[in-house]
Amino acid sequence: MIELAHVSRVVGGRTIVADVSLRVAAGTILTVVGTSGSGKTTLLRLINRLVEPSAGTIRVAGRDVRTVPPHALRRGIGYAIQGHGLFPHRTVAENIGAVPKLLGWERARIAARVDELLTLFRLDPALYRDRLPAALSGGEQQRIGVARALAAEPPILLMDEPFGALDPIIRGRAQDDLKAIQQRYGTTIVLVTHDMNEALRLGDRIAVMDGGRLVQEADPTALIGAPATEFVGALLGRGDRAFQLMALRLVDDLVEPGPAPGAPIPAGTSVRDALAESLWSQRPALPVSRDGVILGRVTRARLEAQGAGP
């Protein structure tokens, strides 16, 4: 869906992005992570031509973006930023419906899309569509900002630190919402973050930027198992890597026959969460269920073994 080939951006003799090449498959999430000044936001803005490359080629759905007028290109690309950027004097419904209105959608279609997105973000349309942004919490404003970016059903969504200002609990829920919506619509997402845990949680692939260069691009398990540079290893955190791997793995493949006491855990539980439950409840084994049916058990010993190095 998106391809960058030897893309650079130089401003005033300073290289912001240096010779970056990568591909983003349709219907996947690429998270771009790095420290401040690493070039990750500029990389994002190059895709929808908010800034222009000094060298290289960017293609979206096979077309060189330089052959498409910027306004036409952006109609097919949603854009969500930290701080949401909502119009303060427009209602929630007017904010979400802004781009569809510009595209000439009929009122009934816009209203239906507004209610659909509010429902997907677990916000009751009857309670929220006529509110102004000032009447919303920070988390609600951020979710409306993402809903607005998705309103015109773009095949691509670019997100720049969309959840950075949210507290951890609200942030986790917003991440879950995004993942569910992406899977429902098959949207291709490029999400910039400085938070490696967020990158691992959301990304099908992760691109690590350092000093304007792409130093590694891999799936989460490969990235954790084999950091390409000391910088990537430092971002991951040496002491955290075992727990990061455990958060990516599910208990499904660790179930064995046999009974275990207490309430079951779902088969889709991460190894990390299952181990936490085992330790917290002081149970050496946990029953595992799917759709209300007990599949077997998972033992603490098998859970702990998943934290070993690859």
Image (tube, grey):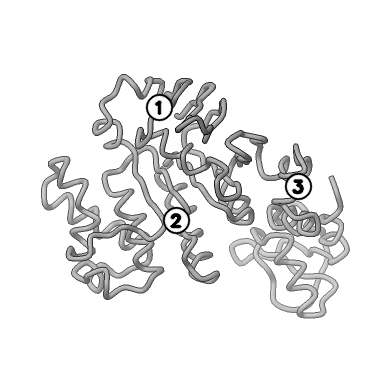
Amino acid marked by disc 1: Val
Query: Is there CB contact under 8 Å for labels 2 and 3?
Result: no
Q: Quadrant of residue 91?
A: bottom left
Viewer-nearest residue: 239 or 250: 239
From the image, which quarter does the C terminus lie in? top right
Residue on which the image places disc 2: 162
Amino acid marked by disc 3: Gly
Expressed as whole percent of the image width and height from the top left, the position of residue 137 reads 36, 74
Amino acid marked by disc 2: Pro
Q: In which quarter of the image is residue 71?
A: top left
Eyeballing the image, is 184 above or below 177?
above
Horizontal side, residue 82 vs residue 92: left or right: right
Q: In what element is the residue under mark 1?
A: strand
**Crowding at label 3, few (<14), some or many (≥20) Cα neighbours within 10 Å?**
some
State the mark number for residue 60: 1
Expressed as whole percent of the image width and height from the top left, the position of residue 235 reads 69, 51
Horizontal side, residue 190 vs residue 123: left or right: right
Residue on which the image places disc 3: 233
Q: Quadrant of residue 94?
A: bottom left
Q: Indicate which disc, 1 or 2, sits on the residue closer to the N terminus.
A: 1
**Crowding at label 1, few (<14), some or many (≥20) Cα neighbours within 10 Å?**
some
Horizontal side, residue 301 vs residue 74: left or right: right
Q: Could you tell me how many numbered marks the image carries?
A: 3
Q: Indicate which disc, 1 or 3, sits on the residue closer to the N terminus.
A: 1
Query: Is there CB contact under 8 Å for labels 1 and 2?
Result: no
